[in-house]
Image: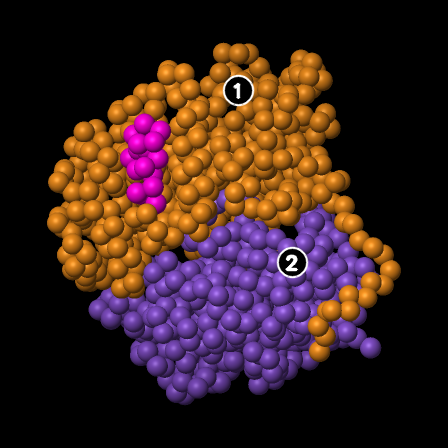
Chain colours: A orange, B purple
Amino acid sequence: MPEPDAGVISQRQSLVAALRKLLPGDCVIDDERGLRPFECDGLSAYRSLPMVVVLPRDTREVSRVLSLCHERGVKIVPRGAGTGLSGGALPLADGVTVGFGKLNRVLEIDTANRCAVVQPGVANLAISTAVSPYGFYYAPDPSSQIACSIGGNVAENSGGVHCLKYGLTTNNLLGVEMVLMDGEVLRLGGKQFDAEGYDLLGVVTGSEGLLGVVTEVTVRLLPKPATVRALLLGFPDNASAGACAGEIIAAGIIPAGLEMMDRPAIHAAEAFCQAGYPMDVEAILICELDGPEVEVDELVALVGDLARNSGATTIRTSRDEAERERFWLGRKSAFGAAGRMAPDYYVMDGTIPRARLPEVLNRIGELSREYDLPVANVFHAGDGNLHPLIMYDSSIPGALQRTEEMGSEILRLCVEVGGVLTGEHGVGVEKRDLMGTMFSDDDLKQQQRIKCAFDPDQLLNPGKVFPTLHRCAELGQMHVHRGETPFPDLPRF
Amino acid sequence: MADNLAPTDADGLADAVRWAIAGEHPLEVLAGGSKRDFGRPVQSAATLSLAAFDGIVDYEPSELVLTAKAATPLATIEATTAAERQMLAFEPADYAPLLGASGGATLGGALACNLSGPRRIKAGAARDHFLGVHAVSGRGERFKAGGRVVKNVTGYDVCKLLAGSYGTLALMHEVTVKVLPAPERTRTVLVYGLEPAAAMDALGTALSSAHEVSGAAHMPDEAAARSAVSYVADAGAAVSAVRVEGFPASVEARCEALRELLGRFGAVEELHSKNSATLWREIRDVRAFADDSGPLWRLSVPPASGADAAARVSDAVDVRALFDWGGGLIWLGVNGAPDAGEGAVRAAAAAVGGHATLVRADAPTRAARAVFQPQTAGLAALTERIKRAFDPGGVLNPGRMYAGV
């Protein structure tokens, strides 16, 4: 992380006094007890006490806070619900953490335009709950959806088990209101389908709080599907489960969810919540199908046949909602189950081409033995997003470091087989130093120039995403030889 | 004499850009050239053709991804994916007939203009299917962004920014897109004789149902009369159309349910796969306006405001309309207005909270009028900073979108 600025820290009291002129007393937190709950996000291995926390109540207050901090050269760390898994909301000792807990209202449900306008602190699931009486829902469903906020979802471009069919956050947004670091308020998009001009909404989504602070979100709503059913499929090895996932997609089916768990994950989940998973298999697939009843019936039968042909030894179809939820129970409890197996666990998030799954799982198995750290794998099998859960004990000296080293090896492996470092959790501080395995210096500099266009002083969430901080003036320079250069070899027509 | 550059590899593209920067020769960027007359006229000293970047690089049907060089014709992509029973789900349009162009539409061109067809309401826009890119910036630097997998949040989503940047930020030479299974069957439910307001209501009802509608358009009688589908052209009335696609039994069931649901709005009819394909291709390519060359606007508005927006324009100037995206996309052909209807169109878009683009007009009109929606001061300044981040010398399609950008 960037070295805290002693000059800024020495001005803390004056900053707090200035913030208290903008916000009521209970919206500015500066005592250690009050700051403690903000010291980390879902990546709890990294902790740091913020200099100050503010909890603005509306866009104007956000704008004023940012403008003040901009004038004083004080860094800002935006924070949604703090459930992120890559340290994107890790506080800075010389920074102000802006929390969105007080911006938590659903502002408008527009059924005619099939969208909802909400404040950033609204929980993901609360949107679907609010629009449910009208027959709609909001599709992206990260596993933390009870708690995670839509503002955080925008920052991280969050996914979920249904994103194979319905897309990530970015595919389900229509517009945002956002505040730039200098306090300027901008609207991107609206209730129409396409934004005007450059797709700034597209680049702000998933920018991990580095480009602007989102103060209002317009999300697209979908009509609830008529029917939802799931299949629970058990396989004698990982390869046949992976092959079955490929067969399902090759048959032209895009399931609402297609999840895989390996043997350690199945056993951990079963011990944790008794979901009724088969214990005599090496891998299971949970395939959820939604849509018109006649379609779901047809596809359930088809997927069952494909699974049988792929060597499945267990094929169960949910007969009612309770059974469908039981199929999901183990998968949804996988992280908690890992937490029961060991004092600590570390969640990875690479994406790989699905066809490379068997070799990647074999290699992860080898790494697990090499590092002597147990690993359970859960996998969004439809889109190739792999979540190895490494179990460790942080009270053993050096264990966290070895876990992180092993995690880095897994992510390098993902990139090596043609995949990427993160499918849905973001780069944050966690994968920052691995960006070079995927991107060249020029690739990263071009991204950082986008950062400079939004935040030239680099005060918004610095130290996240990019391994090297360059000054914007340096990034903006272009070295060219003025005057006519012949370039005789340029092909012309 | 203008130079025409046609590099054959990525280093050649970088050389060409460095040449342009050094000599201050702005470049007009072309692939197939089918949309050359879309946007403000570019003040360029040279053209840069990407035509050599043609061909599919990698196609993995089971991974749902396809990588191709940017100037690969859409026709090639469509034929290749169709052979694997897949498709580009965003249904990119071919504007060549609309713009009177001879060149063929390319994949890179469709992405650069973020062109999405009727399925946009269900499957998303071009930008939603754009996974990865190799490009050369206006600095003459090669860079890549995104990846070759369908789920990726590593770094900024630069692909989104390049989609719809009309070649003003970077020269895309290799792109990776998401592909999806092609539907086995298609049916279209037609509703006859609705006024635009009632039609928006009917389309909205269909879109709010659980029947997974993948097209929702309304053709006022003049637009309907130009269709090659007899059930539409011979109606002698406005025709509203709702499409369902997918597995046969499901399509039949949803089609039946939609006939029932929409029957209360007017008389209904049903198109099978072949007629459906013809109709939705006409709507996608805006064929209702391909026979003339007058000014043509594309309005993007909240869908329920479609009829209202069109009525506001037609109160002021003589227009013909076509509605897609359940009312969220309005095509307005303007007849005989001195300002190409700009005043009325901008006022209507502002009134309902949307924006408008002058997709077709002669070059002097496109030079004199704002082709794209004028931006607020804050957005315009940010847009300029983004442009400078990629192309500080202003050598890539300068002025194509906005003066100075």
The one of B244 and A268 positioned closer to us in this rendering = A268
| Residue type (three-letter) at the residue carrying disc 2 | Val
Which numbered dot is residue A143? none
Q: Residue at x 30, y 37 (%)?
A: A365
Circle 2: element type: strand
Between A405 and A169, the one lying in front of the other is A405
Name which quarter of the figure residue A160 lies in: top left
* Residue A478 in the image, given as x and y percentages of width and height: 76, 49
> The numbered mark 2 sits on a residue in which chain?
B
Instruction: Give the alpha-carbon distance from disc 2 to disc 1, as whole Å.
Output: 40 Å
Looking at the image, residue A476 sits to the left or right of residue B150; the answer is right
Q: Chain of mark 1?
A: A
Question: Which residues are drawn in magenta?
Answer: A360-376
Within-10-Å neighbours for mark 2: few <14, some 14–19, many 20+: many
The label on residue A48 is 1
The residue located at (56%, 20%) in the rendering is A50
* Position of the C terminus of chain A by quadrant: bottom right
Q: Is residue A192 left or right of residue B46?
A: left
Q: Please name which of the two marks, 2 or 1, marks the residue nearer to the observer.
A: 2
- When the figure is inspected, residue A407 is found, relative to residue B2, above or below; the finding is above
Which residue position holds label 2? B136
Q: Looking at the picture, how far across and down is residue B279, in whole percent?
A: 42, 79
Q: Residues within 10 Å of mark 1 (few under 14, many from 20)?
A: some
Q: Is A109 inside the magenta-drawn segment?
A: no
Most distant residue in the right direction: A483
Q: Main secondary structure of the magenta part?
A: helix
Front-lying residue, A432 or B299? A432
Mark 1 residue element: loop
The amino acid marked with disc number 1 is Ser
Q: In this figure, what is the number of numbered marks?
A: 2
